[in-house]
Amino acid sequence: MNYPRGSALRNFLVKKFLLLSVITLFFLQSLSASPFDRFIGEWHLIRAKSSTIELYKTLSLTIRKKNDQSFRFIFFWGTGKNIHTDTICINNNTNQFSWFIYDRVFPENVFLGVRMPSHTLVHGKVLTDSSDRRIDLIKSYILYTSQGKYPVKELNEFELTNNDNILHLSISFPSRNDTNNYHFILKRKGYREAHVIRLSDNWAVQGDLDIQAMLLSIQGLVNRKRPELYFLYPDNWDYRFTGDFFDYLKDKKYFTFRQINSLPDVLKTYTNRFKGYIIWDKNNPSTLDLAFTLAGIRDGIVVSEDLVPLAEKSGLSLLVDLRNKYSKIEDYQLFNQAFREIGQECNRNMVVWLGGESGKIRKPAIADWGVMNKAFFTDLSTKTADSAEYAVSYKIMSSLKPLSIVYGWHVYKKDKERDFVKLASQCGLRVEGLHTLPNMSFMHHIPLEPGFHFHNNHTIRPDKQYKPEKKVYISCVQTDCLGLGTWNKPGRGQIPYAWEVTMNWSWLAPAMLEYFYSQATPNDYFIGSLSGPGYIYP
């Protein structure tokens, strides 16, 4: 065999050495791996899904690796000055643990009338399973009651779910042979923690629209990578499920929310996520569309003149000022110029038509989604009779990639639904309405539960032949995205009813479809909407 010589030999030996080092490191890591490693971290109680803790109210758990031989499970019952701490030391080599009981308090329920054996060292056994996601601690100790000493066996069961982000802790007492057990659900620190803001019902240009617009731009920027900011819309909003879905997020998706109640607090929380602010002109509402476009591609928040002091007090600097810039030109000229100057910086797979209400009222709920995705915003007419605006609308739509999506809706006072969808279809695009569609930047990031499948409530047997009787048949079909807010109204599910499903939601907002399907009764039947994955005129 011919071996390499000189520099080639050195390179050959270096590569061999590196390969052996990697193999050795991997081997050593596999030897030192422990079933407890997955549990390392800080865990915080989800109180709404856990047993009541009478005095301390809450529980947190910190799991640390002290060295290759031992781990620490540190329980913090309560917070602040009202806190009780227990530490369990686990020997990784022997699967034994020790627990020194400092205090007589029984923390799960201090009013139970029992006393722990204070200043006592307790030893126990640790059981693990092959998945490394289950740990059982078996404790035996003496408990003091009003009738005297009582030997107790306590079982602590720890189990990880949701990609190791949710920890189920069950505390039971096999020696008591009863059902007086405790069940706690904790989640890893930082997992599905978000903020919530309740929006007002004032969408007037000279009212709270500037506040709503600023919040929507903030939501789009903040939610770019993960769901961090959710809005609760007014009860009479087109899509009436934001409140119910909020509860669903907490109950089924393990989200915990902190409410933000003021604009200064919003900016204080997220200021470091923005590069500055963009001013739109209240006297020319079309500049709001351009401001949203710039917000997405410049990472800035949208403000009116009235909100500039607040933005500057928060440390933000001016990026673009649109006041008085387009006051002497028509809308088609504004958007034509804007598209020529910044259109290439925008997302080529989507555009947002910020239509619907116009004039004194605007409801741009879809704006967060457009800002998040750096979309171009406009509200031009798509009616051929409006030749100037139509030409620019065609220019914008035809520039997108085939099968791209037009989000939002047409302007009610300018054109018709048929004009809007027709032009999008001619350009090979799909429409996903409406302009009032809320929280898309948040909902897009939430996946289906593992193993979840969409099942319909079929009542027709394919092996049976059906013959119509001599009577009138009535088929109830609810259109427009499960009836917008109809799903939440009383009586739903009591009669056979077909619900038109927006099929794009299977990838745009899968958890929203899961929400509907998981609540369906045998009377609720889902059908594909309109022309399938998007609204078009074939």
Image (cartoon, rainbow, N blue to C red):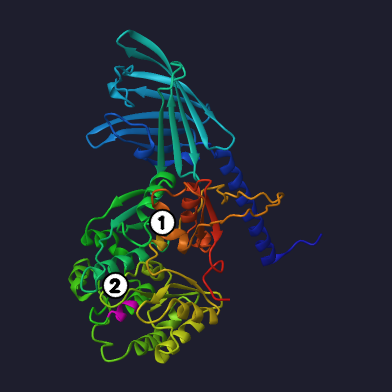
Region rendered in magenta: 285-289
In this rendering, the count of numbered labels is: 2
Q: Is residue 19 above or below residue 390?
A: above
486 left or right, relative to 425: left
Q: Is residue 81 above or below residue 353?
A: above
Which image quarter holds the C terminus? bottom right
Residue 93 position in % (x across, y down): 53, 29
- What amino acid is found at the position of numbered circle 1 in the picture? Thr
Q: Is residue 149 above or below residue 139?
A: above
Q: Earlier in the sequence, mark 2 or mark 1?
A: 2
Residue 306 position in % (x across, y down): 18, 73
Q: Say which residue label 2 marks.
A: 302
**Which of these two is toward me, 310 or 289?**
289
Q: Say which residue label 1 marks.
A: 486
Q: Is residue 191 visible?
A: no
- What amino acid is found at the position of numbered circle 2 in the picture? Val
Q: Give the CA distance from mark 2 to mark 1.
A: 33 Å
Residue 287 part of the magenta-drawn span? yes
**Which of these two is toward me, 50 or 364?**
364
Q: Is residue 355 above or below residue 521?
A: below
